[in-house]
Image: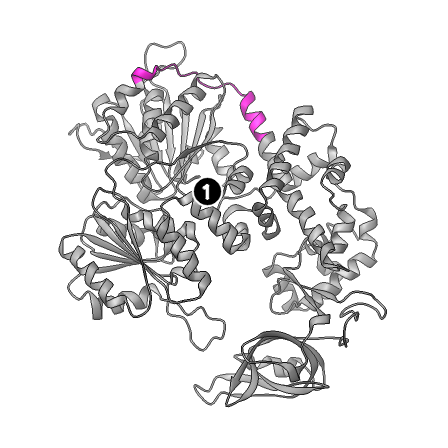
Amino acid sequence: MPLTDLLEKNFRLQESQKKALKKIGLKTIEDLLYHFPTRYGDTSEMKNISSLVAGENVVIFGKISGLKTGKAFIKRTPISEGYIEDETGRIKAIWFHQPYIAKMIHEGALVRVEGKVSERKEVLGMMNPKIETMTKIPTGVGDSLFGEEGEAHSLYPVYPESQGVTTNWLYHAVQKVFKEGVLDNLIDPIPEYILKTYNLPTLATALVWIHAPLKREHALSARKRFAFEEVFFIQLQKKKDRLLWQKEPSFVIEKTPAEIEQFVKRFPFTATDAQRKAIDNIMTDFRSGHAMSRLLEGDVGSGKTAVAASTAYSIITSRPKGQDFGNLQTAYMAPTEILAKQHFESFIQYFTYLGINIGLITGKECRKFPSKTNPKEWTHISKPQLLKWVENGEIPILIGTHALIQKSVKFKHLAYVIIDEQHRFGTAQRQKLAQKEGINPHLLSMTATPIPRTLALTIYGDLDLTLLDQMPTGRKPIITEIVLPGERENTYDKIKKELEAGRQAYVICPRIDVPDPAKEMAVIAKSVTEEAERLERDIFKNYKIGILHSKMLPADKEYVMQEFKDGKIHILVATSVVEVGVNVPNATVIIIEGAERFGLAQLHQLRGRVIRSNNQAYCYVFADSKTQKTVDRLKAFKNSSNGFELAEYDLKLRGPGELSGNKQWGISDIGMEALRNIKMVEAARAEAEYLLSQDDTLAQFPLLTAKLAQRKTDAIHFE
C-alpha cells in the first residue's frame, strides 16, 4: 500500500464519504496518516448517565432506543429524538434539522455521544450532541475503545471530521493502513543525529503514538516531533532560498546619507528614529552588491510608506550602469486597487518636485503622472502605452496590484521591488515579480500585521527583519474604552459629538448576514446588514451609513470606500475587511462589535484605522461576554498600544489554534503548536543553518532534498 495510493482504491467508500474526505483534504494514504487527532479522550474518565450534571460537556457510551423523527413544537423544525441508556440510567437526546439520524442509526445500536447536558423542568437532556455508532462499549479503566480485547490503554483519538466521516471511521482506517505494513517501509527524512539530539521519536513510532497512544506522554512526544518537523522544513527551505538569493548580483546604489537626508527633510513631519534606522539598514543592503531581501514590520500609522519612498528615491535618482542618462526603476505592489491608488497619490506628493513619471496599473485602468496638459495632475492612459513606457525605462516608478506580475509587464532596469502587506501575496507571486528581469532587484516586503517573534522567525526565515516601533510625533494615543451591555447609550452620545464636529466613524461587526437562530451551532453575533439598518433607524438618523464586506463586488467595495474617503458617507459599517484599507484621516472613531471574537492583534489593526491624523481618536470595544478570560484579554488590549506585545499575549493566552495558521500563514495546526515554544523554533532554525553551512545543495541528504521538493509543489501562501 504505497503512501501515494488514493484512499478510494483501498477503502470501500460511499458517495457521502468521498465528499466528506474531499472536504477535509484527505485524498491519499499519506494524507490520512498526517490527519492528526486534535485531542484525546480517556475511557477511564467516562461518565455514567446517572452522574450527569446540567451544564457540563460530557462523553457517554450506551445503547440507543426509541429513535424517531418529528417536528419541533415551535417553528415546526424537523428533528430526530431518542434515548441513550447505560446500566445506570437513560437520557433523552434531540437533534434539530437532522431527521436523517433516526434513519441512519438502528434501534439498540451501541453509540458514543458527546455534547452539553441541558436541563428543562428539572429533566436532563442533550441538544444536538455528536453521535456515532460503536462496535464495543468500554466498561472501565484499562478497556480499549477501539482495539482487541486485552489492550492496555484507554485513550482514544478525536479527529477533525466531517459529516459522513467520523472519528471512529478515521481511527479504523488508520489502523487498517498500519496492518498493511506501511510503517515498515517508511524512511525518516530527518537525520538521525537530530532525532537523538532533541529526543524525538522516529517517523514510524511517532505515527503510531499520535494515532493510538498508550500514554499521554507518547501523544505529546509524537506531536512534538511533527511540530519540530514542520518548522524545520520551513526553515530549511527559507534558508536555502535566501542563500540562492544572496548569490545573485544586484544593483549597487551609492547614495550618501546627506543625499537621503535632503529628501527626508521634505516630509511634512519629522522622521522617527525607527524610520531613520530602517532607511539606514536598507541603504546598507543597497551598497552590498547582493540582492536585498528585507521585511519591514510596523504598526498601522508608523510610517512604512515614508521609508519605502525614501529608499525608492535613492533608486530612481541613480543611473543604470555605464549610462549618464535614464533612471533605475521601482515597482510597488499593493494588495487592493484602493491601496494601489492611495500609494500612487502619496508618491505623486513625494516626487512631484523631481519631475519624474509615475505610473499606476490595476486590473481596470492605467494612469500616468504628470499629465501633458496639466503637469500637476495625473491622466488616464491606455495599457499598451503605459507598458511601452515602462519597457523603455521612461516610467521610473510603477505602482499596481497583481497586474504588475502579468507577463506583458516588462521593465528595462528594475532595481527595487516593494510589496505592501506581504502576507497577502503568495511566495510564488513575490518571486515572480522579483525575478522578472535578468538581474535580481532588491526586495522590500512590508506588513502592518503584528505577529509573534516565533512566527516571524519561521515564515520570514528568508528575510532580514526591521521593526518600526515608534509612531510619528504629534500623534495622540487612541483612547480605548471597553463597553459592556448597558453602557451603549452613553457611548453613542459621545460618538454623536464627534460626528457633529464633522468627523467620521467605523463600526466593525463579526458577521455579514443575520444568523439563523434555529441552527444550534450558529454564531450569534452582530451582522453588518442588520446593524447598519438598526443604527440608521434608531441611533444615527441624521447621518448617511454605508456598508462594506467581502461578499460585495470589487467595484462596489471601491465605490463605498471612495464615498467614505470623500466624506459622503459618515458611518461605515463593515466586517474586518477594513483591516488593510484606505487612509481616511477624518475617521476618528471606531466601534468594534463582538470584540471577544477577534484576536488581539486583529483588534489592534482595526483600531489603527483611526490613527491617521493628529486629531484625538477613539476606539469603543463592545463586548457581549463577561467571562474572566474575555475581560483579561480586552484589558490587555486597552492598556497596550504595541501590536507586537499583543500578538505575543494572544499566542500565550488563546493558543496557536486561534492564530488561524493554516488559513493565514500556510502552517498546519500542529506546526503552530511549535510557535509557543521559542526554544523549539530556534533549535529548528539552528539545525537548518548548520546543514546548509555544510552543503548548501544538501547533496549529502537526498531525503531532505526530496521532502523539500514535495513541499514546494504546494507553496506556502501568506493568507
Q: Left of 5 or right of it: where is 305?
A: left
The residue that mark 1 highlights is 423
Q: Is residue 689 above or below residue 215?
A: above
- Residue drawn at (50%, 90%), measured in percent from left and top? 121
Q: Position of residue 256 (x, y in %)?
A: 34, 14
* Nearer the observer, 641 or 492: 641
Crowding at dot 1, Cα within 10 Å, few <14 / some 14-19 / many 20+, comes out as: many
Q: Nearer the viewer, residue 575 or 120?
A: 120
Q: In this picture, is 249 found above or below 9?
A: above
- Find out whether residue 643 is within the magenta segment: no
Residue at 54% in and 84% down: 79
Q: Residue at x 26, y 68 (%)?
A: 533
- Chain part drawn in magenta: 241-259
- Which colour style is shown? one colour
The type of residue carrying mark 1 is His
Residue 257 sits inside the magenta stretch: yes
Quarter of the view holding residue 139: bottom right
For label 1, the SS is helix
Q: Is residue 579 left or right of residue 610?
A: right
Is residue 350 visible from the viewing direction of this image? yes
Name the foreground residue: 676 vs 594. Answer: 676
Q: Is residue 203 left or right of residue 327?
A: right
Count how many numbered circles sit on residues in the image: 1
Residue 77, given in percent of the width and then of the height, sits at 48, 84
Q: Is residue 705 toward the left or the right of residue 338 in the image? A: right
Which of the pair 242/271 is nearer the observer?
271
Q: Quadrant of residue 334?
A: top left
